[in-house]
Structure formats: C-alpha cells, structure tokens
C-alpha cells in the first residue's frame, strides 16, 4: 500500500528499521539470558503468588468463614477483586478487536502484550467466584450439565450464570485470538533457532506454519472472524458483570446506567494496567522504538475519555438518586459519600475522576513518569470503585438493625495480593518466552510509518 | 471544482413540505392544542438533535485525528447547520412548555408543588429544586446557546480551513473539538433529563441521557450518509469512493447496535427488577403503544442489523438508502414513544397532525441542509487529511 499518511502524524516506529532488525529486536528477550534484575523481580512475584496459593489452600481447607464476610456483607473483597480483574482484562480485547475495526495502527505494538494481560487477568478473576463457592470441587455445577440428581438445573434467570457463560466465552475467544496471532511469530522464532531443543519447542508452538500464501490468506480470514466475534464480547462481558448488581433491588446497585458505565470503567482500568506494564516493559526489553511516546499518548487519551465517561456516570447516579425521590436510593449515596466508608468513596473520586484529567496537559500526557504514576492511581481507584459499589451498598441496606461493617482478614488480603503475584509471574514468563510485539503485523506498517519513510517524504 | 446546485424542483418540494407543516401545526392548534404541543416538541427535538448529532460527529473527526472522513466533511457540516435554526424553534417550544402554557410538563403546574392544593404531589414537589421553570429555562438557554456558539466557532474554523492548507488552524479546531466534547458530554445527558425524561415526571432512569444520545446520533449518521449518497448521485464528490460509503455504512450499523444495547440495558434492568416506580414507564408504553413499541425495535435493530451486516450492503446506494430511511422512521417513532405517552397517556393519535408536522420539519430540514451545501464547494481539498481521505482504501 502506498504511503499517503499525512505529515502531521507521528511515526509509530522510531529509527530506521529493517524487517530483519524488527525480528532481531523482538526475538532478543527470548534468545538472550535473563539478567539479575529479572530474576529478582520474578522471585518476588513468584513468592507473592505462592503466598496467595497458600491462602487459597487455607480457604478451601477451612471454608470461606476465614474471610471477613458476615451475614450483612455477603460479598466484599472476593467480588471486588473479581470485577477488578475482569475489568483489567478488557483492554486487550478492545485493542485487538475494536481498534482493529477503527484501523488504529498504533495498536500493533501493544496488542500482543495487552492480550496476554487480558488472559492472565481473566485467570485471576475466575479464581474468586470459584473460591467463593466454598466447595470448589463442585464448581462444575455451574454448568448446565445433564445430571443424575433429578431435575437439578442451573438458574438460567440468574446473572451469575450469565457471567459463567460470558466469561468463559470471553476467555476462549481471547485465547484463540491471541494464539492465532502468535503462530506466524512463533514460526519466525523457530526458524532462527540453532539449538535443537528451542527449535523443537517453537516448532510445536507454531503448528507447522510455513508462511505460504494460502496460510496467510486463511490467517487473515480467521483473524477478521475472531475480531468480529470479540467486538460484542468487549461490551457483553462487563455488561453482564454489571447485571450481577443491577438486576437486584439493592439501593446503589439497581441503576440502568450500569452496563455501559461498567464497560467504560473496565476499558479505563484495562488501559491503566497496560500502561503500568508497558512503561516498564519497553524499558527493560529495550522496545522504546516500538512502544513510543506516541503510543503512550494515545493510550492516555483513551484514559481521559473513559475516565470522564465514568465521571459523568458517577455524577449521573448521584443526581438521579436525589431526583428519584426514593429515600433508600438517596441514603445509599449519602452514605457512600459521608458514611463510615467515606474514605473509599473519595479515594475512588480522586483517583478515577480527578487524576486522569491531568492528561489534558500535553506535557503530562507525554511524560512517562507522570503516566506511570497516574496509571497506578487509576488501578487503585478502580479497585475502590468496586469496593464502594459492593460493600457500601450492602453494609447499610433496608434494615438498620442489620447494619454492620466489613473487616478483611489476612486471608482476604493474602488472596488479593496473591493474585497480583500470579498475574505478574505469568506476565514475566510471557515476556521472556513469547514475542511480546506482533512482529509480522508490525512489519506491514514499517514502510508507511517509520522515521525513514517520513524523512524521504519531506 | 463543481458546486452543488439546490435545484428549483427540490426547493419547491421543500417549500411545499413546509407549507403542509405550517397548515398541520395551525390546524392542529385549532383542532386540539393538547395534542399539538407534544407533536411540536417531538418534531422540533428530533430534527434539531440530528443537527446536534452531526456536530458531535464533526467534533469527533477532529479530536480523534480522523483521516478518511476529510472528503465528507462538507456534508457533515451541512447537516449540523440545522442546529441553530432547530435550537431557536425548539427553544421557543420548550420554554413555553416550561411556563405551563400547555400541559406537556406536569411539574410546570404550580399546584403540584403546593401542599395546600388538592393536586399536590409530594414526589414532584421533592424535585422542585431542579424542576422549576426558572432553573429549567436557564439550563435550556445554556444548552442551546452553548451548542450554537460551538457550532459557530466550528464554522469560523472551517472558513479558515477552506482558504488553504493550515496545520495551525487544524490544531485549533482540534482543541475546539475537545472543549465541545466536554460540554456535550454533560449537556447531552442533562438536556435529555430536562426536556424528555421530566415529561414522565415521576419516572427516572440513569441511562436515559445516553439512550437519547444514541438515538439521535445514529439518526445523524444516517442523514449524513444519505446526503453523501445524494451528492454522489448528482455526480459530485468524485473523491468519495465506495470505501468511504462503506465506512459510513459501518457507522450506521455499529450505532444501531449500540442504540439497541442501551435500549436493552434500560428495558431489561427495569423489567427484571419490576419496581413499581420504574416499571410503570414501560407498562404504559407496552399497554397503550404496543405496536409502536415493538415496531421501533424492529426498525431500529433487526432491520439495520440483518441488512447491513453484509459487506456488500454497506457499499450499495440502494440498500443504504432504503435502510437509512427505515432507521430514520424508526428513530422518529422511538422519539414519539419517548415523548407522547407522558402527555397524551392512552388518548394518543398518529394521524394527519403528527405526520403533517413531521413533513413540515422535514421540508425545513432539507431547505437548510441543501442551501448550506449549495453555499460553497462540496469538496474540501485544503483539509490537512484530504490526501489521506482521497486515497482511502479498505
């Protein structure tokens, strides 16, 4: 395709890269040896993950009574963490499917790692509802399987069951989409290996990819079909997660804006996590020429948009709770803002609505350090958002005699921290064994959007 | 470079439509003013909001640095130029309604706020801090005035853009777009609560603003597409190829699905929870407006979804025009079902008055848009992304 990009567009690949240089740069982390820093970080992550696994084991062995739940607050950190992780998992699919439909070429440098992050985040998320069942060995009961217990069926009217379908579909499609994209890149790595062991492994992973025209044609067709399937999934997963709350008649939960607002929040948190990870990764793996400030800036713009959508939704809820004239609704919001959990509400407001507005300043939007700090704020804020929705609505509902507080136990905290460990461990393994940038895709734009082309056109 | 000519035949047609509209409105007020007011509100809102939707789309093109759409910028602008005229007419209708010259807004009746009155309504009285004529009118003026000011600023930038390639001006338009989007993000929701949601004064839904937005935005995208097809039919806009048309078709498809998503979210959550204060809204509509209620969903979802899902359909003038007209009828009737039940309850009509008023507004709409198109060249070669747009190929 000829290059007709306007000269005001920033190049997406810096330096004068050749096809071979791209392969070299992206294969380097896989072929090289891990440095000391990597080993230290990996050990810490693995230890935290192990601690989480220990807390899981303790929960399964003793029962979920070891969590801080009580009869009023029956959902707390578990579901908060579940929603938080599922939300983080949204950026990958948005980048790979929706940005593909919108022909955003900057997605090519980040889609691979964002999709990996999606898959790891969904794994972390899925642990929580499974744990919450208590008897995890009966987890398969959530599936509508023919059974010998008489007419024992799952409750199709329950949004919790819709969640099972939505998230398992989302996970499967994301995994297949991610893996399909990896096949040609695995083949490139396979063809470079001199050691027979490595060659064998990447040969298996690449499914015998030969790069023939027929294979490419099928590859492109299947990618398009998967993008089409993924697009509604970006919206459906968090829509259904929001319905876990919104279909009920709990003040603060039952509100019609929840589906789109949860989706916007999920994309918001997902991009924050992508930024947190990629700002480190581009430095450690020397990918500054591929994941440029332009990429960071584009993601920051998505953070402003989705953060502002979330902000508008918060204010809408707040206003309509007053406007409704329903005393319970009004109290739920008054209690959020001024009740005993006021600090969580205001942490949410500060982190999610106020800090992202700093990205209106170009200097901040283009600063890696500022972006990194704000991305952490957003990660924290989005955790608090779910905590606010879940715990503050439950702890004081219709019956004042049942009002109580929720206090997490060390197991609640351990499991949450543990999933962060699991997430980072998986991501670190990924960053050294998988091509972290979709090189075959990136090579399609190197001629139209790198510094050397822009120079020749000027 | 050839210009669009607003042929006298088309001009006469639009004037004839306006005459029908004027007769219907005058006749309507003479026959049954209780029915004429919501009709006027409905139609003036529907056509104004299409202009607003087009202005939003225009702003997005700049804020998101969109390249492909540079070649269809003039049609987008032309559709948005309905906004100031629409805002003037709608503003008068809505302000008179807030002054309780009619009975569109139940809350505008001072008796419902008065504890001594037999018509006292404690729920509505609880909302009087927000729903009172003075504050309502101030808000209306801010929304409409703000949008029109932004519209004029965009047109001023567009004038400079037409004079020659100017990156500085493009950047200034981009920041104007960002400011507009911030203003729009808030006012698009709050205005929908004020003007439409408050007709069913007891009822509330947090999603209502976004739902209203989705409806008028997809209508605007459809009108823009139809205008581009009309220009192509006249042999204008040679730089717009079938890839541009395909992209416009995708937008019609995508936002029809988005509208349905919001329709479903709002409906399903209210139906599922079945709380009296919320569900009455749908009960009224389902009992008294059943045909339109179902017909809407059919026209606004199944039609565009099943027809436009195919790639070829989005590139074919005939298919796009037909689907586009169906979408517009669908959203016009959706607006009818949003506005009328709160005023007319079960005593509603969809007859000469409603159709005639609609035709009148349609005539005015065509007159403004086509006049605007004829006022300057329809191509826009000095846009910074013109080159990208001309070579658009997917």
Image (cartoon, coloured by chain):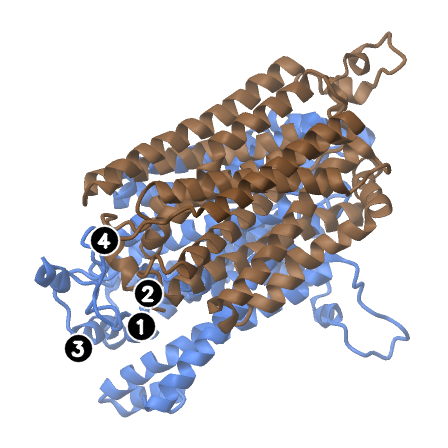
- Circle 2 or circle 3, nearest the eye: 2
In the image: residue A149, left or right of residue A170: right
C-beta proximity under 8 Å, tags 1 and 4:
no
- Circle 2 or circle 4, nearest the eye: 4
Give the residue displayed 90% in from the left and 75% down from the top: A150
First of labels 2, 3 by sequence position: 3
Where is mark 1, residue-wise?
A: A441
Local crowd size for mark 2, using a 10 Å CA cut-off: few (<14), some (14–19), many (≥20): many
Marks 1/3: CA distance?
Answer: 14 Å
Q: Position of residue A301 (x, y in %)?
A: 36, 45
Res. A134 image quadrant: bottom right
Q: Nearer the viewer, residue A216 or A67?
A: A216
Where is mark 4, residue-wise?
A: A9
Local crowd size for mark 3, using a 10 Å CA cut-off: few (<14), some (14–19), many (≥20): few
Local crowd size for mark 1, using a 10 Å CA cut-off: few (<14), some (14–19), many (≥20): some
First of labels 1, 3 by sequence position: 3
Marks 1/4: CA distance?
Answer: 19 Å
Where is mark 2, residue-wise?
A: A108
Q: Nearer the viewer, residue B380 or A417?
A: B380
- Circle 1 or circle 4, nearest the eye: 4
First of labels 1, 2 by sequence position: 2
First of labels 1, 4 by sequence position: 4
Chain B: its colour in the image is brown
Respond whether the residues carrying marks 2 and 3 are from the same subunit. Answer: yes
In the image: residue A18, left or right of residue B10: left
Marks 4/3: CA distance?
Answer: 25 Å
Where is mark 3, residue-wise?
A: A20
Q: Which chain is blue?
A: A
Q: Nearer the viewer, residue A112 or A392?
A: A112
First of labels 2, 4 by sequence position: 4
């Amino acid at each position: 395709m000829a290059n007709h990009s306007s000269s005001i567009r920033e190049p997406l690949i810096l330096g004068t890269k050749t096809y071979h240089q791209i392969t070299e740069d992206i294969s380097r982390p896989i072929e090289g040896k891990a440095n000391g820093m990597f080993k230290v970080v990996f050990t810490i992550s693995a230890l935290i993950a192990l601690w989480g696994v220990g807390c899981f084991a303790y929960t399964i062995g003793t029962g979920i009574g070891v969590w801080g739940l009580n009869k009023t607050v029956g959902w707390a950190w578990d579901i908060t963490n579940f929603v938080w992780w599922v939300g983080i998992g949204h950026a990958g699919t948005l980048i790979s499917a929706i940005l593909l439909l919108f022909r955003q070429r900057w997605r090519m440098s980040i889609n691979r790692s964002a999709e990996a992050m999606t898959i790891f985040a969904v794994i972390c998320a899925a642990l929580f509802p499974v744990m919450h069942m208590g008897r995890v060995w009966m987890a398969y009961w959530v599936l509508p399987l023919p059974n010998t217990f008489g007419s024992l069926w799952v409750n199709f009217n329950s949004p919790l069951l819709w969640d099972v379908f939505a998230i398992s579909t989302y996970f499967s499609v994301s995994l297949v989409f991610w893996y399909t994209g990896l096949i040609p890149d695995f083949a490139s790595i396979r063809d470079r290996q001199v050691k027979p062991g490595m060659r064998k492994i990447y040969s298996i992973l690449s499914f015998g990819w030969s790069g023939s025209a027929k294979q490419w044609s099928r590859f492109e067709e299947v990618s398009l079909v998967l993008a089409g399937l993924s697009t509604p999934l970006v919206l459906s997963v968090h829509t259904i997660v929001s319905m876990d709350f919104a279909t009920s008649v709990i003040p603060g939960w039952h509100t019609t804006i929840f589906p789109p607002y949860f989706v916007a929040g999920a994309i918001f948190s997902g991009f924050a996590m992508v930024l947190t990870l990629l700002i480190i990764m581009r430095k450690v793996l020397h990918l500054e020429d591929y994941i440029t400030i332009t990429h960071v800036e584009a993601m920051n713009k998505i953070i402003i948009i989705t953060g502002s959508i979330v902000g508008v939704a918060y204010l809408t809820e707040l206003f309509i709770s007053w406007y409704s004239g329903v005393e319970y609704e009004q109290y739920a919001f008054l209690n959020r803002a001024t009740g005993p959990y006021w600090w969580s509400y205001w942490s949410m407001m500060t982190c999610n609505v106020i800090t992202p507005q700093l990205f209106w300043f170009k200097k901040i939007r283009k600063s890696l350090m500022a972006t990194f700090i704000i991305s952490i704020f957003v990660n924290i804020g989005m955790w608090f958002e779910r905590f606010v929705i879940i715990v503050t609505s439950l702890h004081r509902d219709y019956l004042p005699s049942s009002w109580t507080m929720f206090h997490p136990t060390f197991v609640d905290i351990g499991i949450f921290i543990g999933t962060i460990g699991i997430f980072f461990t998986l991501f670190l393994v990924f960053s050294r064994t998988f091509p972290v940038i979709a090189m075959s895709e990136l090579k399609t734009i190197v001629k139209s959007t790198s510094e050397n082309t822009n120079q020749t056109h000027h | 470079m050839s210009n669009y000519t607003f042929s006298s035949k088309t001009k006469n047609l639009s004037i004839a439509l306006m005459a029908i509209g004027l007769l219907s409105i005058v006749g309507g007020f003479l026959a049954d003013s209780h029915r004429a007011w919501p009709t006027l509100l409905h139609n003036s809102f529907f056509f104004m909001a299409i202009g607003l939707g087009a202005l939003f789309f225009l702003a997005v093109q700049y804020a998101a640095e969109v390249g492909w759409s540079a070649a269809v910028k003039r049609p987008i602008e032309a559709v948005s130029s309905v906004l100031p005229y629409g805002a003037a007419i709608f503003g008068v209708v809505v302000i008179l309604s807030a002054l309780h010259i009619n009975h569109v807004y139940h809350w505008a009746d001072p008796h419902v706020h008065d504890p001594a009155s037999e018509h006292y309504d404690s729920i509505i009285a609880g909302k009087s801090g927000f729903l009172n004529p003075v504050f309502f009118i101030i808000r209306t003026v801010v929304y409409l005035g703000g949008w029109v000011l932004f519209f004029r600023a965009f047109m001023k930038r567009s004038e400079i853009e037409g004079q020659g390639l100017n990156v500085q001006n493009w950047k200034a338009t981009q920041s104007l777009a960002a400011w507009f989007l911030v203003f729009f993000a808030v006012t698009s929701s709050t205005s929908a609560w004020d003007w439409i949601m408050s007709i069913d004064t007891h009822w509330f839904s947090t999603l209502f603003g976004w739902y209203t937005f989705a409806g008028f935005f997809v209508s605007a995208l459809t009108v823009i597409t139809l205008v581009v097809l009309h220009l192509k039919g006249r042999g204008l806009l040679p730089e717009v190829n079938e890839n541009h048309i395909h992209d416009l078709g995708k937008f019609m498809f995508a936002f029809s699905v988005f509208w349905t998503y919001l329709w479903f979210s709002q409906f399903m959550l209210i139906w599922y929870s079945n709380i009296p204060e919320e569900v009455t809204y749908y009960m009224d509509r389902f009992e008294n407006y059943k045909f339109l209620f179902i017909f809407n969903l059919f026209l606004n979802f199944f039609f565009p979804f099943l027809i436009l899902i195919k790639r070829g359909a989005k590139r074919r003038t005939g298919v796009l025009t037909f689907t586009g007209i169906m979408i517009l009828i669908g959203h016009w009737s959706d607006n009818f079902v949003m506005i009328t039940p709160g005023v007319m309850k079960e005593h509603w009509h969809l007859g000469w008055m409603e159709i005639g008023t609609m035709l009148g507004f349609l005539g005015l709409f065509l007159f403004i848009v086509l006049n605007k198109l004829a006022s300057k060249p329809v191509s826009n070669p000095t846009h910074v992304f013109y080159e990208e747009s001309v070579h658009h190929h997917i």
